[in-house]
Image (cartoon, rainbow, N blue to C red):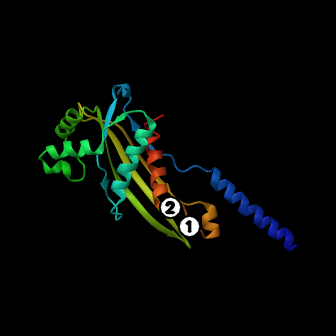
Amino acid sequence: MRYSTLTALATALLAMVVFDGCKSSMPPTDFVNPEFDFGFVERIAVMPFENDTNDRMAASRVTRLTLTELLASGAFDVVEPGEVEAAVNQIEDLSLRQAGRPSKAHIAALGQSLQAQALILGSVTQSGIIRSGQVNIPVVTIDMRMVETETGVVVWAATHSEKGSNVSSKILGTGGVPLAQTTRLCVQGTLATLID
């Protein structure tokens, strides 16, 4: 009797681990302007992300990962961060430097200066560790959008959350996926709605 109870428990645990490995996270929410021709966009610039979290490094981490993932995709020519910073510094209006919220005039000026057809802007709305029982679980949420530089119109936007845990980590009490890896997965999941 004891053997069958242990076997049933082991089978249940195995099924939970397998199920957890097969399940997918909640898909990103995204918007694509149906009238916009993305073939027009050859060169894009990634603006520094806003940080709405207590994690001081969240925005710079997401900005770097977004840049790397876009470069790795080969879908666009991506402006070097130093060029973006220099173009932003040329614009005297401090509102552009605060929280990465350029006006349509700033967007047009940046597009012209950087010879970019679009800007990627965004914010990190969640980046941290939550406690679930004995396990620390990293959670990251990103909002991202692409703005066409001639008109300042948003042509793509997406938001995605990623939780770095699995059933096996909860059952065994081990750590979940590290925050950096969770952030990377969140960036990849967000950009997957833009890049096929």
Q: Position of residue 75 (x, y in %)?
A: 42, 33
Q: Between residues 9 and 164, which one lies in front from this camera angle?
A: 164
The structure residue drawn at horizontal position 38% and vertical position 25%, both measured from the top left corner, is 39
Labels 1 and 2 touching (C-beta < 8 A): yes
Instruction: Determine the image quadrant of residue 40.
Output: top left
Q: Position of residue 151 (x, y in %)?
A: 23, 32
- Label 2 neighbourhood size at 10 Å, few (<14), some (14-19), many (20+)? some
Residue 38 visible within the image: yes
Q: How many marks?
A: 2
Residue 102 visible within the image: no
The answer to whether residue 124 is left or right of residue 170 is left
Instruction: Determine the image quadrant of residue 144.
Output: top left
Amino acid type assigned to the residue bearing label 2 in the image:
Pro
Amino acid type assigned to the residue bearing label 1 in the image:
Gly
Residue named by callout 1: 175
Residue named by callout 2: 178
Q: Position of residue 143 (x, y in %)?
A: 37, 49
The answer to whether residue 152 is left or right of residue 143 is left
Q: Position of residue 128 (x, y in %)?
A: 42, 64
